[in-house]
Amino acid sequence: MSTTPASIEHLVRQCFTAYEEKDRSLIESALSPDFTFSSPVDDNISRAAYFDRCWPNSGHTENFDLESILVDGDQAVVRYQG
């Protein structure tokens, strides 16, 4: 898969859509085996830890307003309201 800024942004949007639609298979297909995640609560956690800690929140989220997506290489920082 290409890793252009547009393709990374597409992956980010796909992940947020998966949360809105409660579609774990969609997000699993979007995240590589070596995916890591960071937030103010979690620092550089693995894909498995992400699914253990973060995915259950999909049940409490109706929608997201993505305010900005900043892509640098193969990394993205997202500012959103949920």
Image (tube, rainbow, N blue to C red):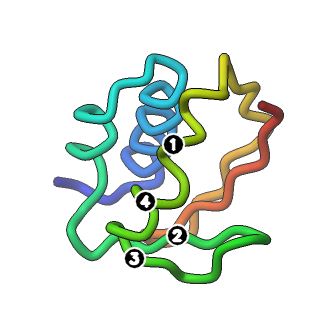
Alpha-carbon span between mark 2 and mark 4: 12 Å
Q: Position of residue 2 (x, y in %)?
A: 23, 55
Q: Quick one: 40 or 77, which is closer to the camera?
A: 40
Q: Amino acid at mark 4?
A: Asp
Q: Position of residue 32 (x, y in %)?
A: 24, 62
Q: Are marks 1 and 2 in contact (CB under 8 Å)?
A: no
Mark whose residue sits in front, 3 or 1:
1
Q: Amino acid at mark 1?
A: Pro
Q: In the rendered image of this protein, does residue 14 appear above or below residue 6?
A: above
Q: Residue at x 49, y 78 (%)?
A: 45
Q: Quick one: 79 or 58, which is closer to the camera?
A: 58
Residue linked to disc 4:
52
Residue linked to disc 2:
37
Quick one: SS at disc 4? helix
* Disc nearer the start of the sequence (2/4): 2
Q: In this image, 41 relative to 54: left or right?
A: right
Quick one: SS at disc 2? strand
Label annotation for residue 20: none
* Disc nearer the start of the sequence (3/1): 3
Residue linked to disc 1:
56
Q: Amino acid at mark 2?
A: Phe
Alpha-carbon span between mark 1 and mark 4: 7 Å
Alpha-carbon span between mark 3 and mark 1: 16 Å
Q: In the rendered image of this protein, does residue 21 appear above or below residue 30?
A: above
Alpha-carbon span between mark 4 and mark 3: 10 Å
Q: Residue at x 66, y 28 (%)?
A: 60
Q: Amino acid at mark 3?
A: Ser
For this orientation, the residue located farthest to the left is 1
Label annotation for residue 46: 3
Quick one: SS at disc 1? helix
